[in-house]
């Protein structure tokens, strides 16, 4: 009898030790916040007080402090704006300029390095020669690029595969979607939470967006990695374009997006168009958009 009790006690102790050794993921919904943010380049020389970077950067700081995103996909980053994020905010960045950094944008992925570490990544041109930066074989109005990287949660060991980009205003959008989907499918792993952020400069019903959603073909091809658009799924429709007023009034079409892939470990909880004002003005000429996820659960998904 005593030996049986000792054996049972030993078994319970062993199970307790094993439970402590198990990773905490999957869990009941670890939060993940992601933003897409067209910064409005300082090269535009917008006037104060509404649009100059000297005024806007304090608004950006307050916005990020309010929402505390894990990842921010930014477009139109100029050198002084990138320096502000890396030197004065808590975020590290990944991503190269589309050309000479003094005159061309840098699309960056900013990430909270206290929680996430980068595993691998690269920047590629939106071009028929994506490895060549700068490169422009589609006669785009501006040099364009995308940044693609994988990250790991330091504690949970969950991985995120994220692409951030900025399509041209009028040209090469279909080619860009074909290239983005191809690169994303080849780079991301089955266990990754997949995220795509960007100012794609085209409305939701157009072929470049419908292709990413697997609702249309491009060049007789279906996307190799079907995605869904978080704002629409969460019921947050409407325009994301503000313009030179830097007000909280949007006009025109939705141009900014956060996409993700449906999987067993990523649950969309909410997505919003943020029109927060500080001292009467917004942070940019585009609305910032944000999606919130729970990792490790499919309960209460949109």
Image (cartoon, rainbow, N blue to C red):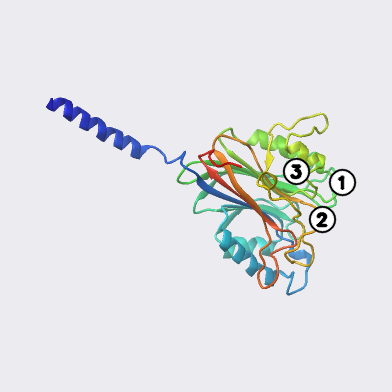
> Residue 252: which disc?
2
Which residue carries the number 1 mark?
Answer: 139
Foreground disc of the pair 2, 1? 2
Write down the quadrant of residue 80 in the picture: bottom right
x then y, percent, for residue 106 = 71, 54
172 above or below 221?
A: below
Q: Residues within 10 Å of mark 3 (few under 14, many from 20)?
A: some
Q: Are marks 3 and 1 in contact (CB under 8 Å)?
A: no
Residue 272: where, in percent of width, then height? 65, 53
For the question of whether residue 109 can be seen, the reply is no
- Closer to the chain start, of discs 3 and 2, is 3
Instruction: Check the image and report above or below for 255 versus 129.
Output: below
Q: Is residue 181 visible?
A: yes
Residue positioned 69% across, 37% down in the render: 183
- Total numbered circles: 3
Q: Quadrant of residue 69?
A: bottom right
Of the pair 103 and 19, the residue shown nearer to us: 19
Can you tell which mark lies on residue 55?
Answer: none
Q: Residues within 10 Å of mark 2 (few under 14, many from 20)?
A: few
Using the numbered discs, state the Cα–Cα distance from disc 2 to disc 1 in whole angstroms. 25 Å
Left or right: 263, with 255 as reference point: left
State the mark number for residue 132: 3
Whichever of labels 3 and 1 marks the residue nearer the N terminus, that label is 3
Residue at (54, 45) in percent of width and height? 294
| Residue occupying the point 83% across, 31% down | 219
Dividing the image into 4 quarters, which one contains the N terminus?
Answer: top left
Can you give x and y, in whole percent of width and height, for residue 29 in the image? 50, 44
Q: Give the percent coordinates (x, y) of residue 269.
A: 58, 46
- Which image quadrant: the C terminus? top right
Q: Secondary structure at mark 1?
A: loop
Rendered view: 277 above or below 215? below
Q: Secondary structure at mark 3?
A: loop
């Amino acid at each position: 009898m005593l030996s049986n009790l000792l054996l049972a006690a030993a078994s319970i102790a062993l199970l307790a030790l094993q439970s402590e050794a198990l990773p905490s993921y999957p869990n009941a919904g670890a939060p993940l916040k992601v933003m897409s943010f067209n910064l409005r380049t300082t090269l535009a020389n917008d006037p104060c007080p509404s649009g100059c970077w000297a005024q806007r950067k304090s608004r950006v700081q307050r916005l990020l402090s309010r929402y505390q995103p894990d990842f921010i996909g930014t477009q139109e980053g100029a050198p002084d704006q990138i320096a502000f994020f890396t030197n004065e905010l808590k975020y590290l960045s990944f991503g190269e300029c589309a050309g000479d950094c003094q005159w061309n944008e840098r699309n960056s992925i900013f990430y909270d390095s206290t929680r996430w570490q980068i595993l691998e990544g690269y920047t590629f041109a939106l071009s028929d020669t994506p490895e060549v930066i700068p490169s422009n074989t589609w006669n785009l109005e501006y040099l364009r690029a995308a940044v693609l990287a994988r990250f790991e949660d330091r504690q949970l060991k969950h991985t995120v595969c994220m692409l951030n980009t900025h399509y041209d205003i009028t040209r090469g959008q279909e080619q860009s979607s074909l290239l983005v989907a191809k690169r994303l499918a080849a780079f991301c792993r089955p266990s990754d939470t997949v995220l795509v952020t960007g100012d794609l400069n085209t409305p939701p019903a157009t072929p470049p967006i419908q292709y990413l959603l697997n609702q249309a073909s491009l060049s007789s091809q279906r996307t190799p990695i079907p995605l869904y658009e978080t704002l629409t799924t969460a019921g947050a429709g409407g325009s994301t374009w503000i313009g030179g007023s830097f007000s909280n009034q949007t006009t025109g079409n939705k141009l900014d997006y956060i996409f993700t892939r449906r999987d067993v470990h990523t649950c969309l909880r909410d997505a919003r168009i943020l029109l927060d004002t500080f001292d009467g003005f917004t942070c940019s000429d585009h609305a910032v958009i944000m999606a919130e996820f729970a990792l490790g659960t499919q309960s209460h998904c949109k």
